[in-house]
Image (spheres, grey):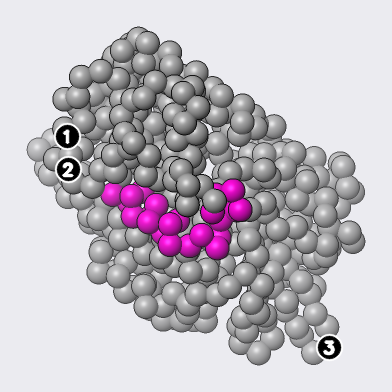
Amino acid sequence: MDCGIYQERELKPRNWAPFPVNPRHVNAVLLTHAHLDHCGLLPRLVREGFHGPVYCTSPTAEIAEIILLDSAHILQEDAEFKRRRHEREGRRGPYPEIPLYTAEDAQACIPLFKAVRYGEIVNIGENIQATFHDAGHVLGSSMIKLMVRRHDDKRTIIFSGDIGRWNKPILRDPTVFEHADYIVMESTYGGESTEKVEEAAGKLAEIVNITAMDGGNIVIPSFALERSQEILYYLNKFLLEDRIPHLMVFVDSPMAVSITEVFKKHPEFLDEEMRRLLQENSPFEFPGLHLVRTRDESKAINHIKGSVIITAGSGMCTGGRIKHHLITNIFRAESTILFVGYQAAGTLGRQIIEGSQEVRILGQHYPVKARVAQLHGFSAHGDRDELLKWLSSIQKRPRQIFVTHGEPETSRRFAELVTGKTGWETSVPHYQDSVILE
């Protein structure tokens, strides 16, 4: 169930550690969605012997191909950059100076993707059936229900994947379930009640207006999948309503541009309003929008006079073109660095939002003088109240709820909250814990 990469600095050694299970002995992978922390280790799994099917929705398969090839390219570039830097400095870094995997490794994954539809039953061997359901998290994202049979007995296990939010634009609401024997669920924002998306949208408009008045740029580190498209949705909306000045908007991410094409290709996965917008006032084609692919186009942005809006990857500032835009803007008091997503511990993005006065970018130190803001309302993850809402549809007491995919203290608090409100048994597994489902 998923095979993701660790992005937190202190957990990165796990990406190089031996797999807990021999990849040659794995029959199939069920992929909930195409974010790197869910699919990013698939190339290594395949290189080390996995050759079974990777079941997922059509958009997930198409987006995973884009993201994995981009990830491999970045890993190769970073390894070479670090090798040269360490050679100049006469030292060795904490990680190998070879890429975790290559573009060839990523390409080898692509033929293994097997597209499934929401609600379709997939037989995994003789005694396991899987069905995929809309998670409302990102385009094509899934919750996966397993039906496991042994003799005349059967158990239902629901893997939540990443749980989306209700009443957000572009996507439909998350699927809810009435019964499960076991639930494995995420808890990314399980410790807090975050602002609603409309509140965050209002603050986005305010930040654009203030920064433009000061003559600065609005630099948005943004995830290529979902967040970039949602930001475009609201910028288009504000421009149509004349709520913000008509600035040039740059999506400086070839990956985000390619993923946006997948959105256009699969309107059947979008909500009704978004399908209508694509026909009338598409947020992916409005005047002043520039979809940037080449390096030269990216560099030219820094020579434009006046304020502009720049969204670029990566969303946590761990790589990609956003680093170059940070270098150009982070020391400018009139500019704003606007975070619209979760920032994992140890990442450059986390350092900036936690108030670091100086940060290291591409081997050089820069003072942080720009305005720094973070909007949680654009998160594609349900917050504490929405996670509880998702659980509230369960009519019969589950045998066990496993709370995962969150910082340890957040997961622990959310598990205690669930037990306190429902009386259900919960646990927070540790890395590589084994559990026997009786």
Q: Amino acid at mark 3?
A: Asp
Residue identifier under label 2 = 295
Residue 167 in the figure: left or right of residue 116: right
CB atoms of marks 3 and 2 within 8 Å: no
User: Of discs 1 and 3, which sits in the foreground?
Assistant: 1
The residue shown at (78%, 52%) is 391
The residue shown at (36%, 64%) is 65
The residue shown at (45%, 56%) is 263
* Gap between marks 1 and 2 measured at Cα: 6 Å
Q: Secondary structure at mark 3?
A: loop
User: Which mark, by number, is residue 152?
Assistant: 3
User: Which mark, by number, is residue 395?
Assistant: none
**Which stretch appears magenta?**
254-275
Q: Nearer the viewer, residue 61 or 342?
A: 61
Residue 259 magenta-highlighted: yes
Tell me residue 428's x, y (percent): 69, 50
Residue 72 magenta-highlighted: no
Tell me residue 166's x, y (percent): 68, 45
* Gap between marks 1 and 3 measured at Cα: 64 Å
Residue 254 in the figure: left or right of residue 204: left
